[in-house]
Image (cartoon, rainbow, N blue to C red):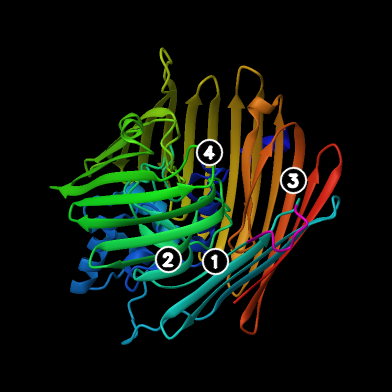
């Protein structure tokens, strides 16, 4: 009990509230990890780079660029001078941005970006391999990745690659994010509690471990006209060919696609989307209506739509209705055959205390089906400098979750801790951990995790990171302990990472990992 009480008073907040809702979007976790390790300089970043930051949409990216044309940002807090950036939003994006005022006269492309990772489950004798690179040559970038998961034998099981000129064209593997993502989207930052209204981010090279729903071909944009074509056999749609175009004329965008599927009943499918993105007097309105089918009757039946509203003062709402048979559904933030209403309110109560309240209603689009409800309350308190205290309560259909966090940050030192309790109809559970990280020329990190649950329904989610661009989500049930240790050191142009993890449960199991970056 003494150990449990000690860990209760050493609780941690994880980056951007990692939890169950985003476990299924590995690209999002990967992007968050990369951003945390390589923050974006808001005084120098392009619009496309700014769009990588959580909460930053087209409007805010353009506003940041307009502001710095008049004067450069001196500190991160100046972002509060821009409409729709709230104190809570600023707290969310702080880990992913930096402010550097001395800019080069000529913008130089980034140097070679290389990440190579090896992980091994010692007890199962299984390996995981990951290699990713990005290389600029006279302004054109070449990028690619090769990955093998633990359970796979083929060392070339999954690969992707492309060459591209940012915001101009991509040849190879790419992702599209058009409108609110009803027909073309990629994993974004929208989930219950995030307070984010999904919006388009254009096209980008596919350099993610997410192995489905990307395109392989050509995409380019000129004077607000985007044209794209793809032929791919690795998507979940089987062998697929498509060609499409999109035209943006503020504040609207029209998109049309014709696709042929080499599977039954999917020949010459048409996809159509109309998108509105308008900001008026500080209020944001986003709306998309889309449909798809092989004939007129299917186009009438398969209408999907989503509406998002943000009043600029912390009140936000999203409503979406998605039929089950809309043919293309790439990584949409909304579920198939679902109707959803999401309401979110955030407020800085006093200078040191802020609160978020949100609720989400969902149901399958079937007769007489009731809505399920999720309710969440989050509090963030900064009693003294460098210390944050956070609390969260969440209720979701018979499952109550309470989380208490404390985090201390100073220069290169971070101490993070957490205590969490889950109550369900099938059983209860708790998790506690304490973590220490020092990050300067070298990195040293260690975390100790203690957990106990009565049933699988009361499982608790815990994440591990440390190797660059790497998140491991653990669904913890039963009773056990976990320890992991990370050490990194710079060696010439390289940075070398070593990670060791051990599970104390019914049997003791080990895992090791190594990474090399430039």
Query: Mark 3 or mark 2, which has the lower sequence index?
Result: 2
Question: Are the residues at dot 3 and dot 1 in contact (C-beta closer than 8 Å)?
Answer: no
Q: Give residue 361's quadrant in the image.
A: top left
Q: Is residue 483 left or right of residue 325?
A: right
Is residue 394 visible in this depiction of the protein? yes
In the image, residue 229 above or below residue 475? below
Mark 3 or mark 1, which is nearer to you? 3
**Could you say whether the residue bearing mark 1 is in a helix, strand or loop?**
loop
Residue span colored magenta: 152-158
In the image, residue 33 above or below residue 362? below
**From mark 4 to mark 2, how far is it between C-alphas?**
26 Å
The residue beneath circle 3 is 482
Q: Give residue 204's quadrant in the image.
A: bottom left
Residue 136: x and y, percent?
48, 80
The residue beneath circle 4 is 264
The residue beneath circle 2 is 218
Residue 138: x and y, percent?
43, 86
């Amino acid at each position: 009990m003494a150990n449990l009480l000690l860990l209760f008073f050493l609780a941690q907040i994880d980056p951007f509230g990692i939890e169950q809702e985003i476990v299924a979007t590995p690209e999002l976790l990967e992007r968050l990890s990369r951003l945390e390790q390589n923050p974006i300089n808001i005084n120098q970043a392009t619009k496309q780079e700014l769009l990588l930051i959580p909460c930053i949409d087209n409007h805010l990216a353009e506003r940041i660029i307009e502001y710095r044309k008049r004067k450069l940002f001196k500190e991160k807090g100046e972002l509060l001078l821009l409409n729709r950036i709230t104190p809570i939003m600023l707290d969310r994006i702080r880990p992913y941005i930096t402010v550097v005022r001395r800019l080069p006269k000529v913008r130089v492309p980034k140097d070679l970006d290389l990440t190579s990772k090896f992980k091994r489950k010692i007890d199962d004798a299984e390996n995981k391999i990951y290699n990713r690179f990005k290389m600029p040559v006279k302004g054109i970038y070449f990028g690619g990745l090769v990955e093998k998961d633990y359970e796979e034998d083929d060392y070339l099981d999954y690969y992707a690659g492309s060459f591209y000129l940012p915001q101009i064209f991509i040849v190879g593997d790419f992702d599209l994010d058009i409108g609110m993502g009803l027909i073309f989207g990629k994993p974004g930052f929208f989930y219950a509690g995030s307070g984010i209204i999904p919006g388009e981010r254009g096209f980008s090279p596919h350099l993610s471990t997410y192995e489905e729903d990307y395109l392989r071909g050509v995409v380019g944009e000129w004077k607000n006209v985007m044209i794209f074509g793809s032929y791919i056999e690795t998507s979940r749609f089987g062998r697929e060919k498509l060609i499409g175009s999109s035209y943006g004329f503020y504040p609207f965008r029209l998109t049309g696609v014709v696709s042929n599927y080499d599977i039954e009943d999917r020949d010459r499918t048409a996809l159509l989307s109309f998108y509105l993105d308008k900001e008026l007097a500080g209020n944001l309105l986003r709306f998309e209506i889309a449909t798809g089918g092989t004939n007129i009757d299917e186009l009438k039946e398969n209408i999907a739509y989503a509406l998002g509203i943000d009043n600029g003062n912390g009140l936000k709402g999203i409503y979406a209705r998605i039929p089950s048979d809309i043919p293309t559904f790439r990584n949409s933030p909304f579920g198939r055959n679902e109707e959803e209403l999401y309401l979110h309110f955030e407020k800085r109560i006093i200078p040191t205390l802020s609160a978020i309240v949100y609720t989400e209603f969902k149901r399958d689009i079937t007769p007489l089906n009731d809505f399920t409800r999720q309710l969440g309350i989050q509090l963030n308190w900064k009693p003294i400098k460098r210390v944050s205290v956070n609390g969260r309560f969440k209720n979701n259909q018979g499952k109550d979750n309470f989380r208490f966090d404390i985090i201390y940050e100073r220069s290169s030192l971070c101490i993070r801790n957490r205590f969490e309790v889950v109550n369900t109809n099938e059983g209860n559970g708790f998790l506690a951990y304490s973590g220490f990280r020092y990050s300067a020329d070298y990195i040293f990190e260690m975390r100790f995790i203690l957990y106990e649950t009565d049933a699988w329904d009361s499982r608790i989610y815990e994440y591990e990171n440390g190797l660059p661009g790497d998140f491991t989500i653990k669904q913890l049930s039963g009773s056990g302990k976990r320890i992991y240790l990370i050490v990194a050191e710079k060696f010439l142009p390289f940075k070398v990472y070593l990670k060791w993890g051990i599970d104390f449960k019914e049997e003791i199991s080990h895992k090791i990992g190594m990474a090399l970056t430039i």
